[in-house]
Image (spheres, helix red, strand yellow):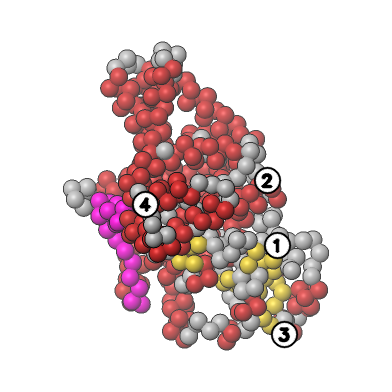
Amino acid sequence: MGKGGDASIPASRSIALKSNDKAEKYTWAEVKKHITPDDAWIVHANKVYDVSNWHDHPGGAVIFTHAGDDMTDIFAAFHAQGSQAMMKKFYIGDLIPESVEHKDQSQLDFEKGYRDLRAKLVMMGMFKSSKGYYAYKCTFNMCMWLTAVAMVYYSDSFAVHIGSALLLGLFWQQCGWLAHDFLHHQVFKHRKYGDLAGIFWGDLMQGFSMQWWKNKHNGHHAVPNLHNSSVDSQDGDPDIDTMPLLAWSLKQAQSFRELNADGKDSTFVKYAIKFQAFTYFPILLLARISWLRESFKTAFGLGAASENAKLELERRGLQYPTLERSGIALHYAWMFVLSSGFGRFSIAYSIMYFMVATCSSGLFLALVFGLGHNGMAVYDATTRPDFWKLQVTTTRNVIGGYGIPQFFVDWFCGGLQYQVDHHLFPMMPRNNIAKCHKLVESFCKEWGVKYHETDMITGTWEVLKHLQNVSDEFLVEMVKDFPAM
């Protein structure tokens, strides 16, 4: 077992550090054995690093999503240039390139091609944000919030109050996109500034924990639409961990038997999967309540939504505990005042206002990121393709259509209409992503890689159809196992 995060350096590493000429050599098969947080080896540029138990990793527990795998490209996607210097102390030897059987010369050329494209984008200044653009977006968002507040404060009309609640739901959705950009460090080079902006737009304005979101979202970016390779590994996508309510693959649907072994009602799970194409939208309406709950638990030390998040909180704790807890407390304070109509509304009316705002926001948010990945390819972590193909084949771009103009799609989706491009270059600011898209499109055509692009209506239909297909496959398997069903 490795001890990468421990203070002491293993003997194997001290030998490797003496001289690169005499460094230990490891096969790909050996690297693949070390896939858990307490025994984690990762590869970067054909160098092997032992990051076992490295719970002080600045980015959190996302480091363990690539235990036993090559992190070269996801590392470049998440980090500023020069960050690899921090990895030197974890170096234990070199990978034997010839031992990686699934990489022929054409694959190596392809990987070099997309790494060259990234270098070209850096040289073009595509990772430099427009501060004026983000000042405008922040100002526009605050104007939405002030309008929603004024509609309650100055009016006694039921229709106006419903309009205010819907506008507040839309405001929360747009806050989500802003927090997303800041916490991907698209706006500021200094990461602390991005974190603080994320606390403002996340904790204070939405009631969402910044650290809860970063752990969940960074894990999703690292391993989109992947199922864990084992019970103890951290290489699965938390965004598709939606059982027992939704199953995105037959393998996931069949896991209901494991749920039943844990004492949960398999009958409920069977029917949830059977009708999931119909319950999808009702679930989205309630999604924000779940996110609020998980955020509160994270911020106040009451639990975690995933094993990866639990590991991060237990070993590392909150990065900004006082600011996160204060932000969430203040969020509920201003939301209580607004939902109560500044003391004028009855309890029932206040709950109605809160639920309209919350459910509409959950729908607005989930519609966009649901379109981004739901219904696209799902892989086992052990059979994942290379970085570029993984990000492209698990992701869907969104365009205008069916009477929905492109400018509305661009605003409503907050940059995530270019989800493919964003997943390839998550630190690229929103103001440059459309320009990047043209280069990505050209690269994919050159190398024969297909990416999926569709309008919002067709994309939503694809998601529902995929859910129904999984249901149908699941029911066929159930009939085979239980003919009387």
Q: Report crowding for label 2: few under 14, some 14 to 19, many 20 or more residues within 10 A (C-alpha).
A: some
Question: Comparing marks 1 and 4, which lies closer to the viewer?
Answer: 4
Name the residue tied to disc 2: 317
Does residue 137 appear in the picture of this structure?
A: no
Q: Which mark is residue 274?
A: 4
Quadrant in the rendering for residue 345? top left
| Amino acid type for the residue under numbered disc 1 | Asp
Q: Magenta span covers which residues?
A: 447-467
Give the secondary structure at mark 3.
Answer: helix
Count of marks overlaid on the render: 4
| Amino acid type for the residue under numbered disc 2 | Gly
Contact? badges 1 and 4 (CB < 8 Å): no
- Mark 1–mark 4 Cα distance, whole angstroms, equals 38 Å
Give the secondary structure at mark 4.
Answer: helix
Name the residue tied to disc 1: 38
Looking at the picture, tell me which residue is in the foreground, 228 or 155: 228
